[in-house]
Amino acid sequence: MRMVSLISQLMIPLFILFAILYGCARKVRVYDSFIAGAKEGPGVVIRIFPYLLAIFVAVKAFQASGAFEFAQELFRGILEFFGVPIDVVSIALTKPLSGSASLGVFTNIVKTTGPDSLASRMSAVIMGSAETTFYVLAVYLGAVGIKRTRYLVPVCVLADLVGIIIAIVIVKLFFI
Amino acid sequence: MNTVWILLIVVSVLFSILNGRLDEFTKSIFEGTKSAVEVSLFLLGIVSLWLGITRIIEDSGLIHRLSGFFQYFVRRLFKNIPPEHPAITSITLNFLANLFGLGNAATPLGIKAMQDLKTLHPEGETISFEMMVFIVVNTASIQLIPFTVIGILSEFGSGDPSAIVLPTLLATFLSAGFALGILFLFRRVLR
C-alpha cells in the first residue's frame, strides 16, 4: 500500500519535471510556452462560471428545502426490501450532486457504522465508482457552450442508477 | 440540463414552502453562489496551470509520443475522429489522469478535450455524439485506486482498508461499460 501511494505521489512532480526537461531537449522556450498556454485559463473559467453558478445554487437549494430528505425516505423502503443498509441511500443520492458533500456523508457513515461495516464498504465502492455527474456536465458543457444536449442527461442519470446497483451487488458478492 | 434545472428549483421552492424552510432556502442560494465562486477560483488556478503544461508538451512534440496503447483504445471508441486530430490526444490524457485519480489534472484536460471535439463541429450549440461518449466515460469515473476513500477507511481504524480496491475496480469498469451500452442503445433507439 505504501509503495502504491508513493508512486501516486510521485506521478505529478515527475510528469512536470519530464515535460520541462523534454521541452528543453527539444529546444522549446519552455517558460514562454507555459505562459502562452496558461493565458487561456481565465477565459475558460469565465465561460464555465455561469454554468457552475446555476448548478450549485440549484443543488444547495434542493438540499436545504427538505426535498433531499424526502427523496431519501422514498428510496429507503425499496432498499430495505433488498436488505441494503439505509445509509447507502444518502451516499447514492449525494454523490452525483456534490463531491464535497458526499465526502462528508461518507466520513459520517464510516464514523457511525465502523470502517468495516457493510454500509461503509458499499459507500466506499460507490464513492470510488460514481462521479459527481451534474458538476461534470456543467463544467464540460459550459466549456464549449453546448445548449442542446439531446439524450445525454437521461443517459447519465440512468447510468448512475445502474452504477450504484452494480456497486451494491458487487459488495454483496464480495463480503457476504 | 434545462429540465433538470427547472425541476430542481421548482421542487426546492415547493418543498421549502411545505416544510416551512423558506429562510434556509434563501440562505442556501447565497451559499450556492459562494461555492460557485470558490470552485471557480480553484479552477482558475488549476486549469491555467495544466493548460500551461499541456502547451509545453504540445510544443515539444511529447504529446504525440505519450500513451500509444491508450490511443489505440480511444481511437476504437471514437471512430469518427480523424486519427491525427488533437482531440485524440487530449481525450487520452484526460482518461489517463482519471485512471490515476488525478482529478485536478483530469478536469482541465477534459475541458481541453471538449474544446478539441468542438472543432470537429464548430457550428451550432447541439452536442455531438463524440462529446456524449466522452462525458459518459467521465461521469462513470474510471479510477484504478480510490486513495481518498482508502485514507478515510484507514483513519477510522479499518482492519483492511484496501479490501475495497478490487470491488471498486470491478464496479467502476462494469458501470462504465454499462453507461456506454446505455448511450449506444439510446442512439440506436432514437434514430
Image (spheres, coloured by chain):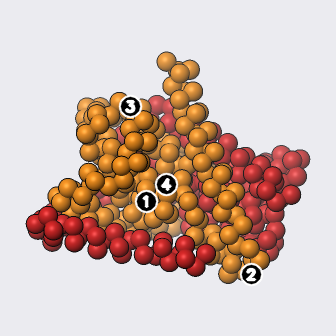
Residue depicted at x 68% and y 78%: B154
The chain displayed red equals A
CA gap, disc 3 and disc 2: 47 Å
Q: Which image quadrant is residue B51 in? A: bottom left
Find numbered disc 1 in the image and state the secondary structure of the residue it sits on: helix
- Residue at which label 1 appears: B97
Type of amino acid at the residue the image marks with label 3 = Lys
- Residue at which label 4 appears: A135
CA gap, disc 4 and disc 1: 17 Å
- Establish whether labels 2 and 4 are both on one chain: no
CA gap, disc 2 and disc 4: 32 Å
Q: Is residue A71 left or right of residue B128?
A: right
Tell me where residue B46 appears, x and y as whole percent: 34, 68
Task: Say whether disc 1 or disc 2 marks the residue closer to the N-terminus.
Answer: 1
Find numbered disc 3 in the image and state the secondary structure of the residue it sits on: loop
- Which is in the foreground here, disc 3 or disc 4? 3
Q: Is residue A163 above or below residue B156?
A: above
Type of amino acid at the residue the image marks with label 4 = Tyr
